[in-house]
Amino acid sequence: MEDGKIVELYLSRDESAISQTAEKYGKKLRTLAYGITEDGQAAEECENDTYLQAWDSIPPHEPRTYLYAFLARITRHIALNMCRSRNALKRNGHICTLTEEMEQCIPSPDDSACRLDDMALTEALNGFLAALSEEKRNIFLRRYWFMDSVAAIAKRFALSESKVKTTLFRCRSQLREYLVKEGYNL
């Protein structure tokens, strides 16, 4: 079923919207959640929570042309929050490593001025990603949005792990330079 029709089901409060969503995107959402939580039961819970949150969010939102992105964002936030709550007393090495890598490139949201500038930062990041080649953009997004391991990225794109690491390092360096040019203090 097309995304627009699924959204129409949500808007008309038809419960079959959830089963249609699960049929079309369930596996992708579970995989995304598993990549973050590294736990099958937690991934399934994240998937189910995504459907509930989508049910609550679709009116007023109407993601007719970007339903998967809408759902993936919800899933990602739920999975990250789950990791934070489960690891309140101990740090999750996988997420900490990714956070440390990106802290070198993106300004910290610790002050209100930075929070007010979120929209401009989003536009700057989108501009940076648009300027990357398709391969580099895919590698970057697989690592920092989907939180795939370097080994998984290398396998997915038939590259060596060394090439993936080098590409990520260079992309982070380019991102840092790009953000400095855009006026961000790093």
Image (spheres, rainbow, N blue to C red):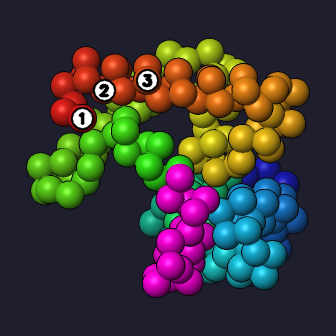
For the residues labelled 2 and 1, say whether their Cβ atoms are less than 8 Å apart. Answer: yes
What distance separates the C-alpha of mark 2 from that of mark 3? 10 Å
Residue type at mark 2: give it.
Leu
Q: Quadrant of residue 143?
A: top right
> In the picture provided, is 72 more to the left or to the right than 87?
right
Of the residues under marks 2 and 1, which one precedes in the sequence? 2
Q: Position of residue 108 (x, y in %)?
A: 26, 49
Secondary element at tag 2: helix
The residue sitting at 47% across, 29% down in the picture is 172
Q: Nearer the viewer, mark 2 or mark 1?
A: 1
Q: Earlier in the sequence, mark 3 or mark 1?
A: 3
Residue drawn 67% across the image and 70% down it:
37
Tell me what residue is drawn at x 25 percent, y 18 percent. 181
Q: Label 1, secondary structure: give it.
A: loop
Q: Which mark is residue 186?
A: 1
Q: Residues within 10 Å of mark 3 (few under 14, many from 20)?
A: some
- Magenta segment range? 79-97
Classified by dominant secondary structure, the portion drawn in magenta counts as helix
Mark in front: 2 vs 3: 3
Residue 43 lies, with reference to residue 146, above or below; the image says below
- Residue behind mark 2: 179
Q: CA distance from mark 2 to mark 1?
A: 8 Å
For residue 58, say whether it is visible.
no
Q: Which mark is residue 173?
A: 3
**Is 132 above or below relative to 101?**
above
Q: Which mark is residue 52?
A: none
